Image (cartoon, rainbow, N blue to C red):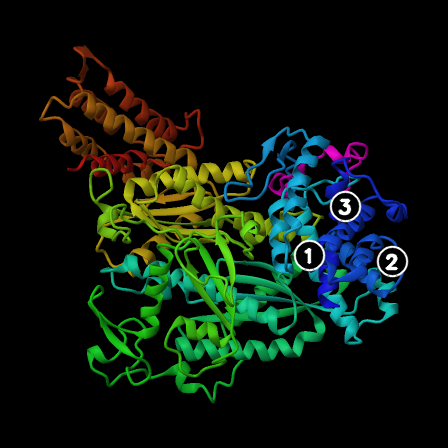
Amino acid sequence: MNESIYIGALLHDLGKFIERSKKFNLDKEFQVGDVGHPKYSAQVISVLQKRNDFFAKHERRVVEFALYHHQPRNDIERIIQLADWLSSKERERDEVNKDTYYTVPLTSIFSRLFDENKEGFCYPLEPLDISSGFPKENIKLNTAHYENFATKFLEEIGKVTNDEQLFYLLEKYWWCIPAQTTNHVPDISLFDHSRTTAAIALCLYIEYANNKLTREDLIKMDKNDKEHFILINGDVSGIQNFIFNIPSKGAAKSLKGRSVYISLLTDVIANYIVKRLNLKQANILYNGGGNFYILAPKSAEEDFKNIRREIGEVLLNAHRGSIYVAIDYINLAPKDFDEFTKKWDKVKRKVNKSKRKKWHEIDLQQNFDKVFGPYGIFTKENEHCYLCGIDKSERKVSYNNDLEKSLCSLCESFIKITSDLSTANALKIEEVDDNRFNTKINTYEDIFRSFGFRYKFVNINTDIDLEQNGRMYLINNTDFIENGYRGFKFGAFNLPLDPQNGNILTFEQIAEKSKGDNKLGVLKLDVDNLGNIFLNGLGKSTSISRVAFLSRMLALYFQGYINELVKKRGWQEKLYIVFSGGDDTFIIGSWDTVLEFYQAFYEDFKKFVCQHPKVNFSAAISIFRYDYPVIMSAEIVEDKLNEAKNFLDKGEKQPTKNKVNLLGETFNKEEISKVLEFKDLLLEIIKENSKDKNFGRSFLFKIQKSTLGFKNILEKSTKGLVDNFRFWRLAYYLREINEGVTVNGEKINYAEKILDFYREIVLDNILDKSQNKKIKNIMIIPVAIKLALLETRD
């Protein structure tokens, strides 16, 4: 019955999609009741049952779940109805679309955050892929659009053989269909409404089956304050040190594997919890960036506590405290779905507290030595792992020639992940029963096997026996159903490969692809005030389906679209994406490409979020030699990102964020544009004077010299002290060094162009005469000169 409830809830609103095509006629047996779409849902499911064994095994009850979910005749049908209600709690009303419900497109959820009401930003009807998610203005739909889209969907749903395929297929087609267009603002997707309805329905049924939910409770559910759910949150800590604490030599072969391991680990743990509690994929409300949320029934509370302890023991045994997954939960009553974002935030804060009391869920007395050590203090240099410190008596340790260090078999296995990724286009997942909670951990596969899973990256074109005892998920490709694959996984899994031999490019080779100086750029970025966006941005409409929609769309950009951007810009060999997921990204690459990536990624993000003024990200970009210690570069960039997020402009009491720290200086978006504009002007001057061997970089050094002391000038200006004489002397000097600039025999007044920058950035702002109050940072010119020097170095 569990699976029938799940399928019925997933498909309960299928008719909303089909009805809008105005193509399909209802059979006589389904022409009952007052509401239209349940009839279409029931008819389509009925047809599928006649043609498809998967749907047929659920018999008539799934048809009836859909047909009667608005007018339930028994307790089970009422569970579907209640799940539907709880999923869509507090939809915002709108009378405008009442008569044209079948032509209304899905409104971007970003356009309505913080009551912004940016009208006209909607999604076209198109199957989901990694380039999806960008809203378009003034989209007009008609029945023909729905008919064509429905035809494609019905063709593919007929090939479904299991509930997981069905889930991914609904995401592929229903992500862009509004769940409700009549009397409500259409800013929740049909997919997110359906998956959260299915998650709630399954929880309610388990409560009902365990006699925790009575018929009276079901009848009075809208007033029910009894707790029937738990909201689980898990968050990985220790990620930064785990990923980056490796030698710089050979780092390109190790970084990606360690990052992807964290991503897979959260996936394994989330799936393990769901499997142990007899739940389904829809119960995983979100999973990305080392973070997951799961909706479970209250009756599973004690089982969950045991599961959490088991997870802690496995990870402590494997990583000896370097990786910790804080997992906690809160109880939910039906009334809590009215303000679901508050509960989302509450469980997150509870998990953050758990991080400050690590391993509280296990027996610390029994595991004292594993938590507190000591580890391998009496071993010789080559008898313990250089990275994790484990002794060869506990785990196999061997010398790695590429890193020139001794590594244990577990740390070596992370390198194997990187190697597998280099040719992979799919992920194979198997459920295994052997070796559960094995005390001997030799590889990452042993850790996953402890939870009953085996994960392996494969190539569907070259690997054999792919389907044997495993489920296949295509990577960044949603065309999965034709060949019987289970679904798809979005993720920044690509690696920069040498086109000649297919090997992973080293950081030295990537640095050599830079313009001018062979340096690496390191970028870290993340979304500003994400907690506030969820907690306050959704306003009064804070249903679980809206939270699910918002979180999934953000993940689509950071885990999906990033791959499309890198590919279409031709940056595959110049960028090494260490990680990108949830709301943050870390990239190493040729320094000039990293700078270009930041610009493009930011501009596209603003398009993705409808240019919303309160949805931004801050970033930090630093430049290093290719052999600079990875852990140190990561720490520096992290510190600079914090500087960017906490930077206060003149007169500000609270940081506005939406900044980028470039080469140690923090700029807003307008200022960073000026940095690049001035850099390009300097390069243009050098190019036009390329015949003069005495010009070139010496010109840049003169300009650089003229900017010494800029910060002191700025500090004096904030106190009302302006050194006018110094500025005019500077202006005279600039004219002098540019007297000989000519193009085709004609003198070009580049000096005046340079002085224009000084006037706007220095004089006008300090004297408070600037037309553009957004240009405030006087260090625009020095940083632009540094970039020009980097680009012109041989």
**Span highlighted in magenta in the image:** 92-114
The Cα atoms of the two marked residues, 2 and 1, are separated by 19 Å
Residue at position x 25%, y 50% in the image: 501
Q: Earlier in the sequence, mark 3 or mark 2?
A: 3
Q: Is residue 616 magenta?
A: no
As drawn, the residue found furthest toward the front would be 51
Q: Amino acid at mark 3?
A: Gly
Label number found at residue 72? 2
| Rendered-image quadrant of the N terminus | bottom right
As drawn, the residue found furthest toward the left would be 694
> Residue beneath label 3, please?
15
| Rendered-image quadrant of the C terminus | top left
Q: Position of residue 747 (x, y in %)?
A: 20, 12
> Residue beneath label 1, please?
196
Quadrant of the rendered image containing residue 612: top right
Q: Position of residue 405 (x, y in %)?
A: 22, 70
